[in-house]
Amino acid sequence: METKKDWYKDAVVYQIYPKSFCDSNGDGIGDFRGIISKLDYLKELGVNTVWISPCYPTPDKDNGYDISDFDNVDPKFGTMADFEEMLDEMHKRGIRLLMDLVVNHTSDEHEWFKSAIQGKDAPYRDYYIWKDPVNGGPPNKWGGDAIGGSAWIYDEKSGQYYLHVGFHYQPDLDWENPKVRDEIANMINRWFDRGVDGFRCDVINMISKDFEADHPGDGPRLHEFLHELHERCFGPHNAFTVGEVWDLPPEASLMLTAPEREELTLAFQFEHMREGREKGLRFYPAEFDPHKFVATMAKWQKGLNGKGWNALCIENHDQPRSIDRFGSKKYRRESAKLLATLTYCMQGTPFIYEGQELGNINPVFHTLEESIDIESQNNQEILIKKFGVEETLRRFSLDSRDCGRVPMAWDDSENGGFTTGKPWIKLNDFYKEVNAKKELEAEDGVYGYFRDLFKMRAGNKTLMRGDFELVTNEGGAVVYRRFLEGEKDVYVVLNYSDNAISIPNPVKDGKILLSSHKREALTDTLKMKPWESLVIE
Ligand code: TEU
Ligand code: CA
């Protein structure tokens, strides 16, 4: 597909978690043919790019983020021919595809690791990170996935430790080894040869490590390794890449993404996702302050302005639903619309997670077994010890990664139209109220508002390229301005609260571009209903 440079600035990205999106063959697992059946639904929404979470062969301990073969697709999703048909059907609709690049580690069932663990001289041994014991124990104090555990696993056979900064079944690849870098670069180019358009890069700042540092990641050769990938893979294919990196300030993020760096195109910033959690910690809810949330997003708008580009994201497969965290279940549709208007009218590339366009909300975990994700399992014991089972279940229903992984509901039929079989994970308890059919039919449905928002946005140069200025951010009132030389200013006016409030109209003789409450006229003082959104120029 012909792609102009900087096409990422015009992208509207929709993340598909393939296991939970749409099952076409009744095995209870989403698949490529299921995705093909929903491409018109995505096109109509205004999506022109899809990020698909990993669909490579995997033992599925981390739902595909533990890869056992980089060069194939997992048979549960279909055949390579099905994948290629899906990609072709996307391209026919002007939809590009970003694959999930998970190359900091492999599954411990990857053939490389199965060989490496055979002994010090085994083939592929040096593809992984092995260290001798230090003072009879792990080489350093890095923590692993089990709370309080080590990131190092002792291998009796060789008397050495190997590293996993992720979960225990995800041994880290040794990027210091040029053979590893060759393997990965060649694999990436094989996916480009199949026609994919770019990659979301999983925990990519972990690929370089300083073993003396307190934490893994952001090591001394990170930029060198990324620049090498740009030279060998991303640049020649004019690819769109977005890095998953945590806890970087804007200036550090720019070191990864400023165009002149020739490393990544964008990097997710997750600082705003920490609001409403004690020290940003999952499962430890705290008072949510909407104005702090907005202020953090505004900080990133300023931080990257003119030098980089934001990835605008409030949901993904690791996060609970944004309405539960940052919105209001009492005002479900209104708050879904407000959060979308707040986020996607800012400067950057929108990323929507499957179901967000429906105003989806968290399921309820009634038993500990229902939340199957390893992060829930790893934290279960300590949470029960601290808070008991009931409170642990409440916290799972607030913040487990499974909150966003229960299947998409397409209608209110059995299994929400996701599958005719037994779904691999529980359904959302609310699928009869929140499903695509209902949202498409409702005159105030969330899907229609997202569609109108993206259409309005795509036709407005100020929103697509303009700069950002926060005007008001208190007492429930949020007002920001987008501005571009030679174009009309655009104002986003939001009532981010449960109360009716008045906000001075920032535009004289303005025109309504978008209204969550189908407002027809503007007045000097805008009497805003709870969670009402307005876009004016
Ligand atoms: O996520 C890494 C990561 O940052 C999250 O796991 C986060 O640390 C955690 O959810 C905070 O509570 C990526 C993938 O998005 C995730 O799904 C994988 O499990 C992980 O890497 C390992 O590949
Ligand atoms: Ca299936």
Image: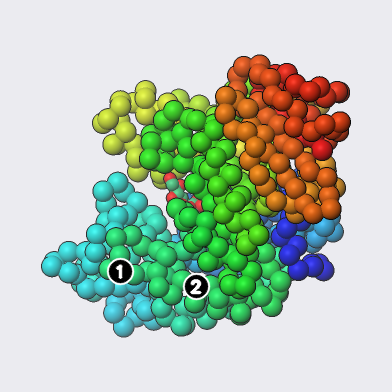
| Mark 2 residue CB less than 8 A from any atom of ligand 1 | no
Task: Answer whether residue 440 is visible to the viewer in this image.
Answer: no
Residue shown at 59%/44% (left/top)?
Answer: 298
Horizontally, residue 136 falls left or right of residue 493, namely left
Quadrant where the image shows the C terminus? top right
Closer to the N terminus: mark 2 or mark 1? 1
Q: Specify the quadrant that holds the N terminus.
A: bottom right
Residue labelled with disc 2: 223
Numbered badge on residue 401:
none
Q: In the rendered view, would you say 458 is above or below 197?
A: above
Q: Position of residue 59 (x, y in %)?
A: 48, 56
Vertical placement of 388 versus 88: above or below?
A: above
- Image vertical order of residue 35 relative to residue 409, above or below: below
Residue visible at 27% across and 56% down in the picture: 150
Q: Is residue 84 left or right of residue 169?
A: right
Say few, some or many: other residues with alpha carbon within 10 Å of mark 1 (under 14 / 14 to 19 / 20 or more): some
Up the image or down, 334 lies above or below 88; here it is: above
Query: Is 321 or 168 nearer to us in this picture?
Result: 321
Q: Is residue 466 visible?
A: yes
The Cα atoms of the two marked residues, 2 and 1, are separated by 17 Å
- Which residue is labeled 1 in the image? 211
**Is label 2 in a helix, a strand or a loop?**
helix
In the image shown, does 312 or 301 lie closer to the viewer?
Answer: 301
